[in-house]
Amino acid sequence: MPDADGRQKVLVVGAGPVGALAALYAAGRGDDVEVYELRDDLRDPSTTPLNFTKSINLALSERGVNAMRHARCEGLLDAVIDESIPMHGRMIHGQSRDGKLYEEPQVYDAQGRYIRAVDRAALNKRLLDYLEQMPNVSLHFNHKLTGADFRKNVAWFEQQTVPKIDHAQNPTGNATEKTRKGRSEEISVHFDFMIGADGAHSAARFHMMKFARLAYQQEYIDTLWCEFHINPRTSDSSFAISPDHLHIWPGGSYMFIAIPSLDKSFTCTLFAPESYFTALAPLSSEEFVSSFSSRFPGVCPELISPEELYKQFIENPHLPLLSIKCTPYHYRSSVVILGDAAHAMVPFYGQGMNAGLEDVRVLFDFLDAYDVYNDTPKLATTRKERRAGALNAYTSQRTPDAAAINDLALRNYQEMSAGVRSPVYRLRKWLEETVSVYLPTVGWSTQYSRVSFGNQRYSEVERATARQGKIMVTAFCLGLTGLTGLAAFGLLRWDGSRSLRALVGKLRV
């Protein structure tokens, strides 16, 4: 078997950013890697995106950068960085009571650190290009995982003769496929190790559940999203608004955001309760624009024409937001799931892709630590046993971390859609950043900085932030108590001195 001669045969299911990076990590360690993807070659412009949108702009932060930094792939990170746009903070848009539009910048980090806007398709293309250059990697597109036996380590794939046209919310339905006569050819593939990185509606997870006692939780939140597009200025083809920021039009339960693209456009997203989308659907174009503009002033007609705004709302899909938690992430030594397949999350912390890429780094850190790639391991065990130990350790550490960022992402919607305008939010952010800058030895930092600009475990970030919050509340209460005490002491002294003066006056008489 391949396991015995120093080389593993690794199957990676899913050729998105997480799957592609996992394949790079495995291939860089000498594994024979086969990548299977449900859709056509993702580098082909004619391939329908995951959700029928023109493009998906994502926020790349330190965790994703660090994962690519350790991929043992020279030039990869520099190429990705060159195709990204730095975003130094949020730009909050609104309208004052006198009707004037305003913009309020809020930097992400007091120390000048920033996140980057990247196009998902461009990032995916870059990763696949590097994979294709590796002699021990083969790419198989239009292959659907139809079954797997994780005791015998064999998987079955259906070869799609017609390219898959679908999106993440409906991974099995395909009108074109249903009209095809007969069944597509099915192949069986033996493997040593499978990595499932095939998204929220993961086939790898589905088949793993037949073997592992997997606890699974799925939740659709009461928010839909729809993509919009801001074109460059017609006068000089420049950015219509600042490219240095992630732009937010907050509105309580509603939010409109805009992320810059390399072509000087902005990819925008409307987030709102399903009831709002339902209420907008029957409106005329004029009524729709009026309702939209009342919630998000300064978007239309300043950045998107009324005709284009209405057209994009009607033509672009209105998609749900899904949150998934499950455990364990593996079964024995045979399979592990990563990224959205293990922990799909809402996009409000910009950590979905970053967490998935970090999954890859953490997984291979454990595989290395357990001597899976060491020909002379410290312990006299088989590679399969060492790999099983590594996967068990990975699940034990990563499960609470994924749960933490999943919860943080859900809570961050309130901060982005409403909290950014709150004086309490601004005060806490200012206090935390001030301590971080002027007392760096204290190790104080905002939650956002810990999540986006460091590699501290998500669960530790959550605990550290909670501790900081308790300290701040305690300090505030002590300060308030001190001020109250000083005021009372001053009042007593004033009242006492007045009584003494009255007594002295009587004695003089």
Image (cartoon, grey):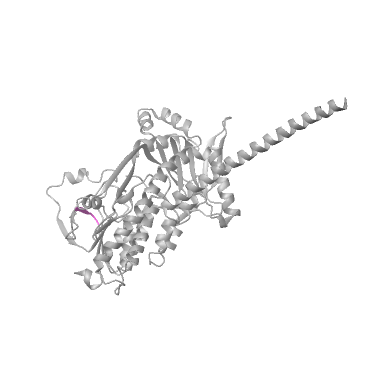
Q: Quadrant of the C terminus?
A: top right
Nearest the viewer among 197 and 52 is 197
When the figure is inspected, residue 443 is found, relative to residue 506, above or below; the finding is: below
Nearest the viewer among 351 and 118 is 351
Q: Residue at x 55, y 40 (%)?
A: 103
Q: Residue at x 22, y 69 (%)?
A: 3
Residue projecting furthest to the right: 509
Instruction: Report the magenta stretch's main SS.
Output: strand
When the figure is inspected, residue 301 is found, relative to residue 383, above or below; the finding is: above
Residue 359 visible? The answer is: yes
When the figure is inspected, residue 322 is found, relative to residue 399, above or below; the finding is: above
Q: Is residue 143 magenta?
A: yes
Image side of residue 466 versus residue 176, left or right: right
Q: Residue at x 11, y 49 (%)?
A: 182
Question: Horizontal and vertical percent for residue 245?
Answer: 51, 48
Image side of residue 443 versus residue 163, left or right: right
Q: Is residue 438 magenta?
A: no
Residue projecting furthest to the left: 182
Nearest the viewer among 13 and 281 is 13
Question: Horizontal and vertical percent for residue 288?
Answer: 41, 30
Q: Which residues are magenta?
A: 141-146
Question: Horizontal and vertical percent for residue 425?
Answer: 53, 41
Residue 263 visible? The answer is: no
Q: Residue at x 81, y 27 (%)?
A: 502
Q: How many numbered marks are there? A: 0
